[in-house]
Image: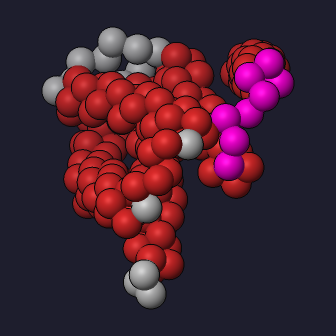
Amino acid sequence: MEYYNYIKSLHLIFVITWFAGLFYIVRLFVYQIEANQKPSPEKEILLQQYKIMTYRLWYIITWPSAVLATLFAVWLLIIMPEWLKEPWMHVKLGFVFALILYHLKCHQMYLQLQNAQFKHSSNFMRLWNEGATLILFAVVFLVILKNAFNWIYGVVGIFVFSIIIMLGFKFYKRIREKNKS
Protein backbone atom coordinates (compact mmCIF):
# COMPACT_ATOMS: atom_id res chain seq x y z
CA MET A 1 0.00 0.00 0.00
CA GLU A 2 3.09 2.19 0.05
CA TYR A 3 2.48 3.19 -3.57
CA TYR A 4 -1.14 4.30 -2.92
CA ASN A 5 -0.19 7.98 -2.46
CA TYR A 6 1.83 7.92 -5.69
CA ILE A 7 -1.14 6.59 -7.65
CA LYS A 8 -3.46 9.07 -5.97
CA SER A 9 -1.05 11.91 -6.81
CA LEU A 10 -0.82 10.84 -10.45
CA HIS A 11 -4.61 10.58 -10.62
CA LEU A 12 -4.94 14.12 -9.26
CA ILE A 13 -2.28 15.52 -11.61
CA PHE A 14 -4.05 14.10 -14.65
CA VAL A 15 -7.47 15.24 -13.41
CA ILE A 16 -6.04 18.77 -13.16
CA THR A 17 -4.53 18.65 -16.65
CA TRP A 18 -7.75 17.13 -18.03
CA PHE A 19 -9.81 20.01 -16.64
CA ALA A 20 -7.23 22.53 -17.83
CA GLY A 21 -7.56 21.08 -21.32
CA LEU A 22 -11.36 21.18 -21.18
CA PHE A 23 -11.38 24.79 -19.97
CA TYR A 24 -8.93 25.95 -22.63
CA ILE A 25 -10.33 23.98 -25.58
CA VAL A 26 -13.74 25.62 -25.25
CA ARG A 27 -12.02 29.02 -24.97
CA LEU A 28 -10.24 28.25 -28.22
CA PHE A 29 -13.62 27.31 -29.74
CA VAL A 30 -14.83 30.82 -28.82
CA TYR A 31 -11.83 32.40 -30.55
CA GLN A 32 -12.22 30.12 -33.57
CA ILE A 33 -15.90 31.03 -33.99
CA GLU A 34 -15.13 34.74 -33.65
CA ALA A 35 -12.24 34.46 -36.13
CA ASN A 36 -14.66 33.03 -38.68
CA GLN A 37 -16.49 36.38 -38.65
CA LYS A 38 -13.40 38.44 -39.49
CA PRO A 39 -12.55 39.69 -43.00
CA SER A 40 -10.03 37.95 -45.25
CA PRO A 41 -7.08 37.34 -45.01
CA GLU A 42 -7.22 37.70 -41.20
CA LYS A 43 -9.98 35.08 -41.03
CA GLU A 44 -8.00 32.39 -42.85
CA ILE A 45 -4.78 33.08 -40.95
CA LEU A 46 -6.50 32.92 -37.56
CA LEU A 47 -8.60 29.86 -38.39
CA GLN A 48 -5.51 27.95 -39.51
CA GLN A 49 -3.66 28.88 -36.32
CA TYR A 50 -6.61 27.92 -34.09
CA LYS A 51 -6.92 24.57 -35.87
CA ILE A 52 -3.29 23.81 -35.03
CA MET A 53 -3.66 25.00 -31.43
CA THR A 54 -6.85 23.02 -30.78
CA TYR A 55 -5.38 19.90 -32.39
CA ARG A 56 -2.31 20.01 -30.15
CA LEU A 57 -4.26 20.80 -27.00
CA TRP A 58 -6.89 18.16 -27.66
CA TYR A 59 -4.69 15.23 -28.68
CA ILE A 60 -1.46 15.98 -26.79
CA ILE A 61 -2.89 17.19 -23.45
CA THR A 62 -6.64 16.72 -23.01
CA TRP A 63 -7.29 13.22 -24.35
CA PRO A 64 -4.16 11.66 -22.78
CA SER A 65 -4.99 13.36 -19.46
CA ALA A 66 -8.56 12.00 -19.56
CA VAL A 67 -7.34 8.48 -20.26
CA LEU A 68 -4.59 8.57 -17.62
CA ALA A 69 -6.86 10.13 -14.96
CA THR A 70 -9.36 7.35 -15.62
CA LEU A 71 -6.73 4.59 -15.52
CA PHE A 72 -5.31 5.84 -12.22
CA ALA A 73 -8.85 6.16 -10.84
CA VAL A 74 -9.59 2.54 -11.72
CA TRP A 75 -6.30 1.52 -10.12
CA LEU A 76 -7.28 3.39 -6.94
CA LEU A 77 -10.64 1.61 -6.89
CA ILE A 78 -8.89 -1.74 -7.28
CA ILE A 79 -6.69 -0.89 -4.29
CA MET A 80 -9.61 0.51 -2.25
CA PRO A 81 -12.72 -1.43 -3.38
CA GLU A 82 -14.55 -0.45 -0.19
CA TRP A 83 -14.98 3.04 -1.65
CA LEU A 84 -17.53 1.57 -4.04
CA LYS A 85 -19.81 0.98 -1.05
CA GLU A 86 -19.74 4.66 -0.07
CA PRO A 87 -22.65 6.92 -1.14
CA TRP A 88 -20.32 9.86 -1.87
CA MET A 89 -18.42 7.68 -4.35
CA HIS A 90 -21.64 6.78 -6.18
CA VAL A 91 -22.44 10.48 -6.55
CA LYS A 92 -18.85 11.24 -7.61
CA LEU A 93 -18.98 8.53 -10.26
CA GLY A 94 -22.22 10.09 -11.53
CA PHE A 95 -20.39 13.40 -11.95
CA VAL A 96 -17.45 11.61 -13.60
CA PHE A 97 -19.91 10.08 -16.06
CA ALA A 98 -21.27 13.60 -16.74
CA LEU A 99 -17.67 14.81 -17.25
CA ILE A 100 -17.02 12.04 -19.77
CA LEU A 101 -20.21 13.00 -21.65
CA TYR A 102 -19.09 16.66 -21.57
CA HIS A 103 -15.67 15.63 -22.91
CA LEU A 104 -17.25 13.61 -25.73
CA LYS A 105 -19.52 16.52 -26.66
CA CYS A 106 -16.44 18.79 -26.73
CA HIS A 107 -14.83 16.22 -29.05
CA GLN A 108 -17.83 16.44 -31.37
CA MET A 109 -17.59 20.25 -31.34
CA TYR A 110 -13.85 20.03 -31.97
CA LEU A 111 -14.41 17.85 -35.05
CA GLN A 112 -17.08 20.20 -36.37
CA LEU A 113 -14.82 23.24 -36.02
CA GLN A 114 -11.88 21.40 -37.59
CA ASN A 115 -14.18 20.83 -40.59
CA ALA A 116 -15.29 24.51 -40.67
CA GLN A 117 -18.78 23.68 -39.40
CA PHE A 118 -19.80 26.57 -37.17
CA LYS A 119 -22.96 25.32 -35.45
CA HIS A 120 -22.71 27.33 -32.23
CA SER A 121 -22.22 30.98 -31.36
CA SER A 122 -19.30 32.26 -29.33
CA ASN A 123 -21.80 33.19 -26.60
CA PHE A 124 -23.05 29.60 -26.48
CA MET A 125 -19.46 28.40 -26.10
CA ARG A 126 -18.80 30.83 -23.26
CA LEU A 127 -21.80 29.39 -21.46
CA TRP A 128 -20.86 25.81 -22.38
CA ASN A 129 -17.46 26.38 -20.77
CA GLU A 130 -19.18 26.64 -17.37
CA GLY A 131 -20.33 23.00 -17.53
CA ALA A 132 -16.88 21.73 -16.61
CA THR A 133 -16.71 24.31 -13.81
CA LEU A 134 -19.89 22.98 -12.23
CA ILE A 135 -18.66 19.39 -12.43
CA LEU A 136 -15.29 20.39 -10.95
CA PHE A 137 -16.93 22.12 -7.98
CA ALA A 138 -19.20 19.16 -7.29
CA VAL A 139 -16.42 16.56 -7.48
CA VAL A 140 -13.97 18.52 -5.34
CA PHE A 141 -16.53 19.04 -2.59
CA LEU A 142 -17.54 15.38 -2.69
CA VAL A 143 -13.97 14.13 -2.49
CA ILE A 144 -12.94 16.54 0.27
CA LEU A 145 -16.07 16.22 2.41
CA LYS A 146 -16.46 12.47 1.75
CA ASN A 147 -20.22 12.56 1.92
CA ALA A 148 -22.92 12.68 -0.67
CA PHE A 149 -23.86 16.20 0.54
CA ASN A 150 -27.00 16.88 2.34
CA TRP A 151 -28.90 16.68 -0.95
CA ILE A 152 -31.03 19.71 -0.25
CA TYR A 153 -28.01 21.95 0.39
CA GLY A 154 -25.99 20.39 -2.42
CA VAL A 155 -28.66 20.77 -5.08
CA VAL A 156 -29.57 24.29 -3.94
CA GLY A 157 -25.88 25.25 -3.86
CA ILE A 158 -25.23 24.04 -7.40
CA PHE A 159 -28.35 25.83 -8.69
CA VAL A 160 -27.37 29.07 -6.94
CA PHE A 161 -23.86 28.76 -8.34
CA SER A 162 -25.32 28.16 -11.83
CA ILE A 163 -27.53 31.24 -11.52
CA ILE A 164 -24.55 33.35 -10.46
CA ILE A 165 -22.60 32.10 -13.48
CA MET A 166 -25.55 32.89 -15.80
CA LEU A 167 -25.89 36.40 -14.37
CA GLY A 168 -22.15 36.96 -14.70
CA PHE A 169 -22.31 35.75 -18.29
CA LYS A 170 -25.16 38.16 -19.13
CA PHE A 171 -23.33 41.04 -17.44
CA TYR A 172 -20.14 40.25 -19.37
CA LYS A 173 -22.10 40.02 -22.63
CA ARG A 174 -23.58 43.50 -22.05
CA ILE A 175 -20.13 44.95 -21.37
CA ARG A 176 -18.75 43.37 -24.55
CA GLU A 177 -21.67 44.68 -26.63
CA LYS A 178 -21.20 48.22 -25.21
CA ASN A 179 -17.47 48.10 -26.01
CA LYS A 180 -18.19 47.10 -29.61
CA SER A 181 -20.30 50.19 -30.25
* Viewport quadrant of the N terminus: bottom left
How far across and down, in percent of the image, does residue 70 sit? 33, 53
Q: Is residue 51 above or below residue 102?
A: below
Q: Quadrant of the C terminus?
A: top right
Where is residue 11 shown, x and y percent of the image?
A: 43, 64
79 and 94: which is toward the camera: 79
Look at the magenta stretch and give its main secondary structure. Answer: loop
Front residue of this view, candidates 170 and 148: 148
Instruction: Report whether 122 appears left or right of 107.
Output: right
In percent of the image, x 74 and y 23: which residue is there? 151
Residue 171, image x, y percentages: 81, 20
Residue interval drawn in magenta:
146-153
Q: Nearer the viewer, residue 108 or 66?
A: 66
Total marks placed: 0
- Say which residue appears at 41% left-offset and 74% top-offset: 7
Taking depth in this image into account, of 81 and 177 the one nearest to the observer is: 81
Whether residue 175 is visible to the viewer of this picture, yes or no, is no
Q: Residue at x 49, y 42 (%)?
A: 85
Q: Is residue 94 magenta?
A: no
Is residue 67 toward the left or the right of residue 176 in the image? left
Residue 14 drawn at (x, y percent): 42, 63
Pick out the residue farthest to the bottom: 2
Q: What residue lies at 83% left-to-right and 24% top-to-bottom?
A: 153
Q: Is residue 174 visible?
A: yes
Above/below status of 154 relative to 133: above
The image quadrant that residue 45 belongs to is top left
